Image (cartoon, rainbow, N blue to C red):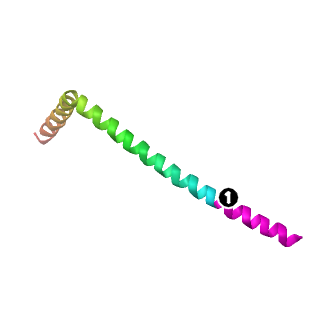
Amino acid sequence: MTSFFAHLEATLYVYGQSLADRREKGQATAEYVGIVAFVALLAVLVIGFKDEISELARGILTGAFGKIQEALG
């Protein structure tokens, strides 16, 4: 009788592991889809606001180079 329960426990463990493996594979796919969606959204935002971003970047770089020139004399 003990061997029956040991066999049942082993069978349920293996079945549980196969279910967990399937869930983890699906989870990885969902994570990749989320990353791709985030990058696509970021690209759309950058393209949509490229003029504002370029002006902001230009201002930051101009300020940084100005400080460098002041420090160098």
- Residue 9 point in image, percent of width and height: 77, 64
Quarter of the rendering occupied by the C terminus: top left
- Residue 46 point in image, percent of width and height: 26, 34
- 67, 24: nearer the viewer: 24
**Farthest right residue?**
1
By secondary structure, the bulk of the magenta-drawn segment is best described as helix
Identify the residue position indicated by label 1 in the image.
16
Write down the quadrant of residue 21 in the picture: bottom right
Quarter of the rendering occupied by the N terminus: bottom right
Say what amino acid the circle numbered 1 marks: Gly
Q: Is residue 5 left or right of residue 37?
A: right
**Is 51 situated above or below 2?**
above
- 66, 11: nearer the viewer: 11
Give the magenta range: 1-17
The reply to whether the magenta stretch includes residue 7 is yes
**Is 33 situated above or below 61?**
below
| Residue drawn at point x = 43 percent, y = 48 percent | 32
- 35, 69: nearer the viewer: 35
Write down the quadrant of residue 37 in the picture: top left
Write down the quadrant of residue 22 in the picture: bottom right
